[in-house]
Amino acid sequence: MNYIIETKNLTKIYRSEGKIVKALDNVNLTVERGRIFGLLGPNGAGKTTLMMTLIGLVMPTSGSARVLGFDIIKNSVEIRKRVGVLPEGADFYDHLTAKQNLLYIAALNGINKAEREERVEKVLKIVGLEDAKDRKVGGFSRGMKQRLGIAQALLKDPELLMFDEPTAGLDPEAARTFKNLVLKLRDEGKTIVLSTHLLFEVGPLCDDIAIINRGRIVLHGGVKDLAEKFIAEEGYKIRVQGKGDIGRFANAILNLKDVRNVRVDREYILIEASKDVRAEVSRLASAHGVEIVALELTVPSIEDLFMKYYKWG
Amino acid sequence: MASVSVIASKEFSDIIRSKRFIILLSIFALLMIAAVASTYISATQGIAAPTAMPRGFLLSVASNLTSMMAYFAPILGIVLGVDAVSGEREKGTLKMVLAQPVFRDTFINGKFLGTVAAISLAVCIAFLVNVGGSIIALGITPTGDDAARLFLFLIISIIYAVAYYGIAILISTVSKKTTVSVIASIMIWAVFTFILPIIATMVVFSITPIRIQPGQNMTITPELREEIRRRITITETVNMFTPNYHFNRAANNILRAYIGAGFMPEGGATSGRPLQQAIRAVSIIESLAMVWPNILVIALIAVFTLIATYMLFVRQETR
Ligand SMILES: Nc1ncnc2c1ncn2[C@@H]1O[C@H](COP(=O)(O)OP(=O)(O)O)[C@@H](O)[C@H]1O
Ligand SMILES: [Mg+2]
């Protein structure tokens, strides 16, 4: 398979002031085309280091990686020519207008003069900043700067986009606008890599995720597959509240095929099963003369999955 | 791929539109005009020059031109270099630029080029205000030799400003924070401009204490002459470590078309007889021969600081 990003034992060790930090520890990662890929992990996990390494601004200590088929060490300029990046903590020139900033970045990308103006207008429109284009960036709000940051990344009409902590510090409204834009870009066929420590805000947006912690990838895959596997591992949890001979009823449930475990807690029966066995439980109830007061199923959520790995390390 | 010229022209236009550049240039232009006015007043009131040297354009403008440039060039260089790297790093604009297909060396070279162009422009403007003002005020047209000397002075001034820019941008590149860079640059400037000369004087006094007693007849004995020579040598040796000394020596000699040496009259200074003077013209070539080592030192400071900045910057990682 031809991945848009592929890393092989990518390792980065920072040495500063006597301290040694393994920011990336043998990272093996693949990103498929046309997907929203979430790089999730707590602060200091190594997300920014990974992104900066992928565009050649940070040199790996060992290992290798290819982005769009280009080697990150030998051909990083080719990568930056083709990848729209919004680095964490990057900012614009305050004394220039939004448009002037974008025109400069367009020039840095080698977009020829005749085309620059048109491209700039186009991306300003995409992010909804046409009305503010002639205002100095110094007076922009955080949300506006973030939109301009995305506009900047879109200037070269890239196949691959990388946004580092794009929703940090945004109000919910702006975050929602951002998410809609990302979905739209994905539907246009672009690949978007998002990094974030805001697990619950961005996580559900992703098609694929990798959870990184202390420089190590602890979970990697498609969100759907991961969720199915997680549910299979964790199982379905069913809570039954009944009136009658609970003890015998519980024993009978334990004998059901897909039931792994049953616990009785006063009038409640807590069932762990590998399938949804509510129908069978109902049938058994009538057979045992138990009146069912409540029958609840809890499916483990994707959030539960994230939390399990987030706490790792 | 981004060429150096894109970055250089942005840098240049940013600088010449910046408040600090315009304010600095305005202040010095005003000072230059004030200096020209004082030259004009002394000329029209016929206040004689303290020497018997031939009066000419250079003699009228040289002293205020050099003393003004001796302050303007370093301050200009420092103001433009002090946050050149640390400022963009702190703000995050460096990261934004380097996330584009731009090599680190392209960025720093573009910055050098744009700033050196702006420095040249500023020094030229300050120079033209002074020289042009003097031409109008004095009504004297510089001779061809004058013009050649003034041109050389202009070049030396630009190199001098670039040397200070090099020092400041080097500090800015190694500093984690702009505030640290500002403090360090100002300290270095103050050391070169005020502190080392003071130290030089102190060293002289501690090594060769004054032996002339008040009331003693000021006859130039061979011992006294030797002592004066020693003092000058010591002062110069200490000051040799400042770019300022080299600039002053180069500028003063380039703008001096005549050399005069004063001799004590017979019977000493208290004899009542006038100071004897021998005056002779020096060609521009002679002047250059005298000061080229000084020009070389300033140029080397400029080149080495810029090369060091380049090497450090290219090796740094983007955080
Ligand atoms: N230039 C650097 N020098 C030393 N340590 C660094 C440097 N950059 C990052 N680190 C360290 O590497 C680890 C990963 O940092 P980072 O990639 O910024 O994480 P994240 O983006 O996930 O918050 C952290 O422990 C951080 O302190
Ligand atoms: Mg980060």
Image: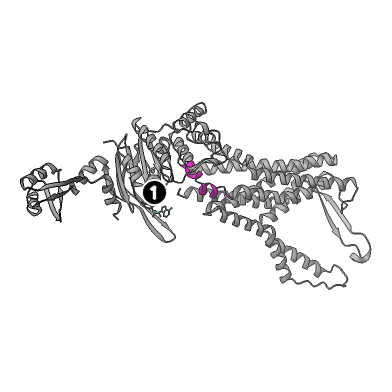
Q: Residue B260: horizontal and vertical position, in percent? A: 83, 54
* B226, above or below B38, in the image: below
Please tell me in which quadrant of the rendered image residue B209 appears.
bottom right
* Residue B85 belongs to the span the image colors magenta: yes
Q: Ligand 1 closer than 8 Å to the CB at disc 1?
A: yes
Residue on which disc 1 sits: A49
Q: Secondary structure at mark 1?
A: helix
Q: Nearer the viewer, residue A263 or B268?
A: A263
Which segment did they paint magenta?
B83-99
Measuring from the top left, give residue B302's x and y in whole percent: 61, 49
For badge 1, the amino acid type reads Thr
Confirm whether residue A1 shows in the render: yes
Is A19 a magenta residue? no
Q: Position of residue B248 (x, y in %)?
A: 72, 53
Residue B146 to residue B235: above or below: above
Q: Say left or right for B32 vs B164.
A: right
Is B117 on the left-hand or right-hand side of A137?
right
Q: Quadrant of the C terminus of chain A?
A: bottom left
Picture coordinates of residue B266, whole percent (x, y): 91, 64
Q: Residue at x 9, y 54 (%)?
A: A247
Q: How is the image coloured?
A: one colour
